[in-house]
Image (cartoon, rainbow, N blue to C red):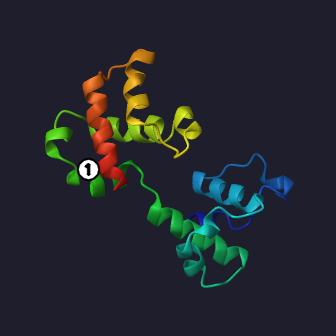
Amino acid sequence: DDAAQFKDIPDSFVDIPPNKYPLVITFHKFLMMLDGTLGNSYFERFHAVRKLSGGKSTRSSRSVALQTFIRTKEVNYDRFCSFYWPHFNTQQTKKLDSSRVFTEIISHIRGGLRAGEARDGKLSREDYVLLSKDRVSTLNKQKREIIYDIFQDYEK
């Protein structure tokens, strides 16, 4: 549990005690520290976070609330395979590997540089399919079309 393991490290990059360097933390702790360093919390926009913390504003309760929220909302590969993959159209998924589809979604469609520049934070179908022409790719246009269809089902 991150909260217990890192209770002596603040949820901010400000005022970290010198004896904590080199700072070795989990990605979740990094997210909480980044959030705590920013003026307005990214997570406060979610009603569920305020509800989880029960209106308490102590560092400890906030940290636990954020960790709980991240754990319940984050879609990692295991969660993708368990909860999403079985519900996709088997005609689309039978010729694709779940890890490849997950990687394409988080690394290109939703997580690439071009996705970050897009107004809605994701590549359009056209831009994603064009990636097969931009560089050496093992995915042809047809597979990219199928992956984008799966992505759209994932987003629902």
Q: Give x and y (percent) for residue 102.
A: 36, 41
Q: Amino acid at mark 1?
A: Trp
Local secondary structure at mark 1: helix
Q: Is residue 8 above or below residue 81?
A: below
Q: Is residue 42 above or below residue 131?
A: below
Q: Is residue 121 above or below residue 137?
A: below
Q: Give x and y (percent) for residue 65.
A: 58, 73
Residue positioned 33% across, 56% down in the render? 156
Q: Is residue 28 left or right of residue 98?
A: right
Can you tell which quarter of the image residue 150 is in?
top left
Q: Is residue 122 left or right of residue 15?
A: left
Q: Is residue 149 above or below residue 75?
A: above
Residue positioned 26% across, 35% down in the render? 146
Examine the rendering and report whether any part of residue 64 can be seen.
Answer: yes
| Residue beneath disc 1 | 85
Q: Give x and y (percent) for residue 76.
A: 42, 51
Q: Is residue 32 left or right of residue 12?
A: left
Q: Quadrant of the N terminus?
A: bottom right
Residue positioned 37% across, 52% down in the render? 155
